[in-house]
Amino acid sequence: MTNIPPPAEELRILDHELRQLDARRAQLLARRSWLLGVIRSAEVPVPAWGPARASAQAPAQPPAIWAAPAPHPRRPEATAPGVQNVLLVLGGVLLTVAAIAFTLVSWGHLGIAGRAAVLGVVTFAALAAPVPLLKRGLRSTAESVAGLGLVLTVLDAYALHEVALPEVDGTGYAAAATALLAVLWAAYGRSLGALRLPLPAAMATAQLPLLLWVVAVDTGHHTITAALLVTAALDTVVALSVPVRSVRVVATVGAYGTGAWGVLAAGWLSWEATGPSAATRAAALLALAAAIALGAAWRAPAAQAASGLALTGGLITVAAAGGVLRSVLPDAWTVPGHLLCGVALLAVRGTWLPESVRRGLRWSSAGVQALAAAWALPLVTVVLVGPVGWAERVWSGAPSDARDAVTVSTPWPSNTETAPLVLAAVAAVLALTFRGGPHRSVALSGALGLAWAAVLVLPATLELPYLAGLLTLGVTTAATLTAAAYSRHAHVSDDGPARQTEPPARPRPSPITLTALGLALLTSLHLVALSLAAEAATLAVLGSLTALFAAVAVRQKHEIRAVSAAASLAYATALACAAGASLDWQPHHIALLVLLVPATAALLAARLKDATSTLSVEITGAVAALLAIDLAAMEPPVLALVLALCGVIAAGTAVRPDRRQVGYAAAALFVLATWVRLASWEVGSPEAYTLPVTVPALVVGFVRRRRDPGTSSWTAYGPGLSVTLLPSLLAAWGDLGWPRPLLLGSAALLVILVGARQRLQALLVLGGGTLALVALHELAPYIAQAMGAVPRWVPPALAGLLLLALGATYEQRLQDARRVREVLGRMR
């Protein structure tokens, strides 16, 4: 509705708006004056338009004349040296192709004299032309012509074989020809020192003579491999001694290429060796390759390259010695033999060798040890994962030995009898190598893990009896747990002196402590999985582990106590389940036995002073309680009892000042217990489920308002009343009888009276709304009957009259509604 103000009020509003406009105009004028002053001081012409035209006095300036941009010269897309090189390379290639075509196609059209004359004249001219070209300073042209001359010498050699020496073996002739060409090209390059092409070309050609010669004489794979390695050695010498950079690059590439080919061939020969003699010959080849790599590492100018070459040389040395040992030892001892050779490389520590070489050899030894440990890893995996299969065959009978116990679901790997020895040896080397220094803790942790793996696979490897294997794992669990409990802790270092008021920093666990604790838990789980084969073994193992971890939790503090206490309670839960199954109890009866664990956890948590230990114990107890609830889920009466007992435990925990929030969980558990019990009695009335919630909620709300009178009635009584009134109202609307609506209406009336007396908003609103809806439900049949007898035009007419009445008394109704709102607002 539009409300037009009186004239006096409208005049006041207009005056206020005009004052605001005047103030804004004054601000804009002040800003304009300041801008004009700035423009005049800078001698900038004022625009000849707008209000500033009349007041600005700055002289007009002539319009600026923009100069046309200067044309940029077009830059060439290719440089002159680049064009020159392209032309020279293309010319040399075309001449080379023409020479090859002449030699291969047109050779037969000339006589002997003509052939010799043509080849001699052209080759001599091509090789001699660079001399005057270099004197004139045409170095690039000389390089192209010299390249053509080198190619012509190759064609000369080919033509000589085809005409004069056709009966000579091609491979042998090629070996001699490449050797002669390499020498001639090297001499030619040395005589014309300004040319860059002949010397690297000679070095590249020198890779072929020895290899072609051994292939021509057909001396076998060992000789070919030796030829490759000798060529690599010569390339290494040239790469380390010749000052010409291009020759060093070609020699380095040749050394790496022929050396890698030779090492692979020698390794294949060592692997295929069937006896000590063949293995020794292959080892000699590998030793030659190792000597080349180590010699290059010794003389290499770069430390990184030296370390890499020494690493390669060390690995080749291990392969050579290990190959000989493999030929005389059983297959199971192949890895230990190579490991022994790798450990022997550590003897270079403290020797006169350069530091880069010693570093590379140490890394090669570490690589061999890592490969040996990786070889034993599948066996460790089989031993750890195999016993999981007993979960499907619980208490089916104890196996004959430890190997049968771990291979219930996975096969045993072959030739792994020496895996414990390998793991123990690597652990010992790791512990002895890092006896000091900053990496000592990490190294000892790794050594501890390897020693643990060796002990873990030892019973199955030796095929010890089943009980002996369980005893070994039990002792290992106790030993690793003891190591975790009594190992030293690492202290947190401070950057500056500690303040007198600050408490000392709590020591944090060292890597050895964490590793030992993790290994203890893993061993205990493995032990439990193995014990599932026999009933007595399961009970004994679970009882022992419960006592062991509990003893460590009592003696230790901080993280060790937290983990040990949680593990002890977890194994106690498993022991309760196993004991109940051993007594042939039903799952819902076992649930009552499992409840001892959360009860014990609640008592322990109240006595512990460490927050971490307290939290771990409480979490474990909560998980055990959930397990008990799950076990009793199929039996509602027992489930109600279990929920009630869990509520009692939670209520006892909520007594502690720092665990008041657990009281909500306790209340929820009690309510759930009541509901489950009512459901088991087949009670279908909603009030039976809601009243046990409403009564305690109203009591709690009453107590809270007594302690804090400022608490709102919605906070204190709203949840409790809503839990009962709303479900009962829904049930009453679907109930055809009269007792439920009568009782609900009476309860709503009582709530309204109490709310009116105490002036509580929540009680008035909830009770009044419920009573109105109940009355509407009771009057609904009569209203429907009356509406059937009234003409259809009557409801619209009544609605129109109502709207007219409301419009006529609109202002009075607004005042009445405002007073009602104020009255409800003053209530709590």
Image (cartoon, helix red, strand yellow):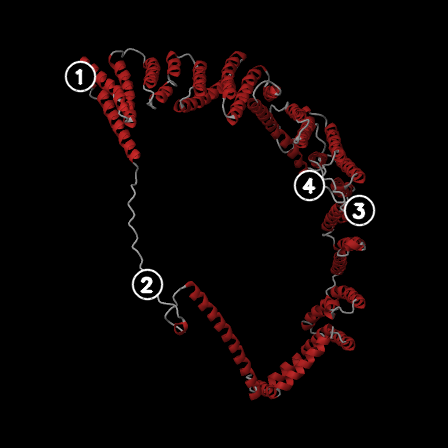
Q: How far across and how far down the image is residue 601, in percent?
A: 78, 47
Q: Secondary structure at mark 2?
A: loop
Residue located beneath label 2 in the image: 63
Residue at image position (72%, 29%) is: 469
Q: Nearer the viewer, mark 4 or mark 3?
A: 4
Residue located beneath label 4 in the image: 495
Query: Which numbered disc flags the more N-terminal residue, 1 or 3?
Result: 1
Left or right position of 490 against 368: right
Q: How far across and how far down the image is residue 13, in percent?
A: 55, 82
Q: CA distance from mark 1 to mark 3?
A: 110 Å
Residue located beneath label 3 in the image: 609
Q: Is residue 499 above or below residue 673?
A: above
Query: Which amino acid is tagged 3?
Result: Lys
Q: Secondary structure at mark 1?
A: loop
Query: Which amino acid is tagged 4?
Result: Asp
Q: Is residue 794 visible?
A: no
Query: Which numbered disc flags the more N-terminal residue, 3 or 2?
Result: 2
Residue located beneath label 1 in the image: 110
Where on the picture, by quarter, is residue 430? top right
